[in-house]
Image: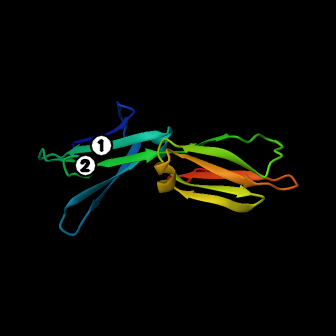
């Protein structure tokens, strides 16, 4: 190879990577004397949450060029290490409600997408919602806690498509 270029697009800006610092290459030769080059891009280039696109371009001594974009082999992916956001309305920490039942709402959002939401009442599933069900209602569900002559523990667990809770 006479020229290699690796770049990353993130949040609309392009960063050209440095060989040896940001990425490495290894070359193999098959039984027909064809060269194959593998690129390993360091994970430190993908520290922030967001959408990334990787472009690889190379040129050999005979001026043959290769590009993952020209081959239709786009390398696009999302990094998501942030938990979904949950907003609860109608209940408070240590709240006491003297009624036969009590309604409250839960709203779940995530930049990449919600996978599901489970609501527990005293360690028993009160309700479960899939991504599709949450999307139908804009991420908001209204639930009812049945009355009880004792304190009740409410727990809400929400996961996104990347597995964050």
Q: Residue at x 24, y 66 (%)?
A: 30
The residue under label 2 is: 68
Q: Is residue 102 above or below residue 124?
A: above
Q: Residue at x 50, y 47 (%)?
A: 137
Q: Nearer the viewer, residue 77 or 145?
A: 145
- Residue 135's mark? none
Instruction: Name the quadrant containing residue 34.
Output: bottom left
Residue 91 in view (yes/no): yes
Residue 42 in view (yes/no): no
Q: Is residue 91 above or below residue 124?
A: above
Q: Residue at x 28, y 49 (%)?
A: 74
Residue 149 x, y percent position in the rendering: 88, 55
Residues at discs 2 and 1 in contact (Cβ within 8 Å) = yes
Residue extending farthest to the front is: 100
Instruction: Name the quadrant containing residue 6.
Output: top left
Q: Earlier in the sequence, mark 2 or mark 1?
A: 1
Residue extending farthest to the right is: 150
Residue extending farthest to the bottom is: 31
The residue under label 1 is: 55
Coloring scheme used: rainbow
Tell me if 60 is positioned left or right of 46 in this view: left
Tell me if 133 is positioned left or right of 100 in this view: left
Instruction: Name the quadrant containing residue 2.
Output: top left
Tag 1's secondary structure? Answer: strand
Q: Nearer the viewer, residue 115 or 69?
A: 115
Residue 20 x, y percent position in the rendering: 40, 41
Q: Nearer the viewer, residue 138 or 112?
A: 138
Tell me if 10 is positioned left or right of 115 in this view: left
Residue 90 x, y percent position in the rendering: 70, 40
Tell me if 104 is positioned left or right of 38 in this view: right
């Amino acid at each position: 190879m006479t020229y290699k270029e690796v770049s990353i697009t993130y949040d609309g800006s392009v960063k050209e990577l440095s060989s040896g610092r940001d990425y490495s290459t290894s070359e193999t030769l098959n039984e027909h004397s064809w060269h194959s080059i593998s690129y390993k891009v360091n994970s430190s280039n993908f520290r922030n949450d967001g959408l990334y696109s990787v472009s690889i371009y190379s040129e050999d001594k005979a001026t043959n060029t290769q590009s993952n974009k020209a081959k239709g082999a786009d390398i696009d992916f999302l990094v998501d290490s942030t938990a979904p956001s949950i907003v609860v309305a109608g209940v408070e920490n240590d709240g006491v409600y003297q009624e036969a039942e009590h309604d409250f709402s839960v709203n779940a959002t995530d930049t990449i997408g919600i996978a599901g939401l489970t609501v527990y009442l005293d360690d028993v599933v009160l309700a479960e919602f899939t991504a599709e069900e949450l999307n139908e209602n804009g991420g908001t569900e209204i639930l009812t806690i049945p009355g009880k002559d004792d304190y009740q523990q409410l727990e809400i667990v929400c996961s996104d498509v990347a597995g964050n809770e």
